[in-house]
Amino acid sequence: MGVKIREKIRGSNEWWVFINYNGKRTSKKVGSKKAALEVAETIQAQLKLNLPVFPKQQEKPAVPILQIWYQRFEQTYLSSAVSASTADSYKYNFKNHILPALGSKPLDQITRADMEVFVASLVVHKKLAKDTIATIVKELRKVLNHAREHKIISENPAAGLGKLYSQAPTRHENIEPLNREEVPLFLKATQTYSPEHYVLFLAALHSGLRQGELMGMQWPDIDWNGNFILVKRSIDRVHRIIVPTKNKKIRRVDLSDELLVELALLRKQRKEEWLSKGKNEIPEWVFCNQRGSWLDASNVVNRHFLKCLERAALRRLRFHDLRHTYASLLLTDGAPIAYVSEQMGHSSIELTVKRYGHLIPGANRSFVNNLPGRESAPYTHPASKQTSELYSTKVRKFKQIKRKIGAGKGIRTPDFNLGKVALYH
């Protein structure tokens, strides 16, 4: 017990001071033997005076609970790194789903078992849709990743949870587009009861732009020679701010001749209107209010769009259904799915197929009929004029077999395998 010096490795000339006092031990490399003796002497004097020798262990800071950490995340990350709509999603999901279940737990005590219980409650008790649960889990995972980056936790318990909600119900968006006969009814009602918004509604039907993208259209975006518009921005109707497009990309959208004519007439009318006010320059926004600012989307929908649907004796729709109408009419007219996807600004063709593929039932069945069978040539349906002689012969034989076995006339499709069985018997 006390203070000693020695080389840990004999002959290394690296001298250490070893302290053994009141059941506590520590050691420190000093250097030369002379220096080690001086340090040992100093420590011996400190021990005699009951002065502290052993370094105090730093207490680890308390690990914050999820609620406190989320508040920090909201003030830093959400306020500067994401769009306003994304921030709103985080705030809603943490307030209504995540914090009530996990908010009081320290970050390092949130376990995989906690995650399993939490996700199960979303599926079984709250009966949320799969996409909704995926968003909630993604946002929780992001916040916990933020804690991991700050060395507060070593692993993220919210990673790899997809299989836990694989059986949650999938709720597809209910798509109710206008059909080809209903579009003229709606536009005629608009010309009669809301003529100032006729070009806006026509643009929605002939461009497929999202509501915010329509409100964000500016005159310089239109290429009058190329007959297209560059979609560069959107208007966030909740926060009333200019934001990038949904996928943060500028895209080119072709415009119909009818829409280009109406836009040109609107621009001419706008110039005359603003000249009468003594102003030489028209507002940059294509669809603007009397002050020259972009339109209030909610006001347009509630006071004009819904009223025009009612006047046209059409069912109540969302404004977004005009975008669905654009896509469905292009697809039913045979437009390539890749072209429609590009025009719509979808992140992938798969998304377009998933959302609108059902609107053209049977349109692609002709392709499977072109596949070769036993013969190299494509199969020809018996109703066609090009019915092969081989098929006709088989049909005659099949009818003879039916008469022999006493089959009725209710069998409409010849089944040659059935005939073989009957001949066998």
Image: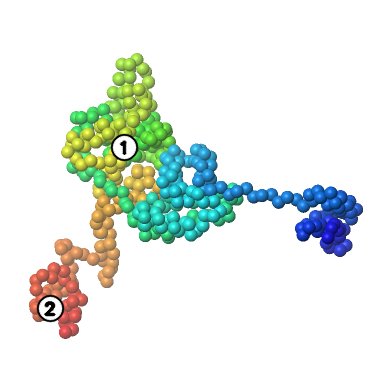
Question: Residue 237: x and y, percent?
Answer: 37, 35
Estimate how packed mark 1 is, as few (under 14), some (14 to 19) or many (20 or more) residues with alpha carbons within 10 Å: some
Residue at image mark 1: 255
Q: Quadrant location of the C terminus? A: bottom left
Q: Position of residue 71 (x, y in %)?
A: 51, 42
| Residue 364 spot, x, y in % from top left | 27, 56
Instruction: Pick the residue in front: 419 or 244.
Output: 244
At label 2, the amino acid type is Ile
Disc 2 to disc 1: CB gap under 8 Å: no
Whether residue 391 is visible: yes
Q: Quadrant of the N terminus?
A: bottom right
**At label 1, which amino acid type do we have?**
Leu
* Rendered position, 257 above or below 169: above
Q: Secondary structure at mark 1?
A: loop
**Mark 2: secondary structure:** helix
Q: Which mark is residue 401?
A: 2
Q: Residue furthest bottom?
A: 425
Choose top left, top right, bottom left or bottom right for residue 273: top left
Q: Going 78% across and 49% down the picture, which residue do you hit?
A: 52
Q: Which residue appears at 25% of the width and 41% of the height?
A: 317
Q: Does 141 sit above or below residue 245?
A: below
Disc 2 crowd rating (10 Å Cα; few below 14, some 14-19, many 20+) is some
Identify the disc placed on residue 205. none
Task: Give the residue at x 16% y 69%.
Answer: 413
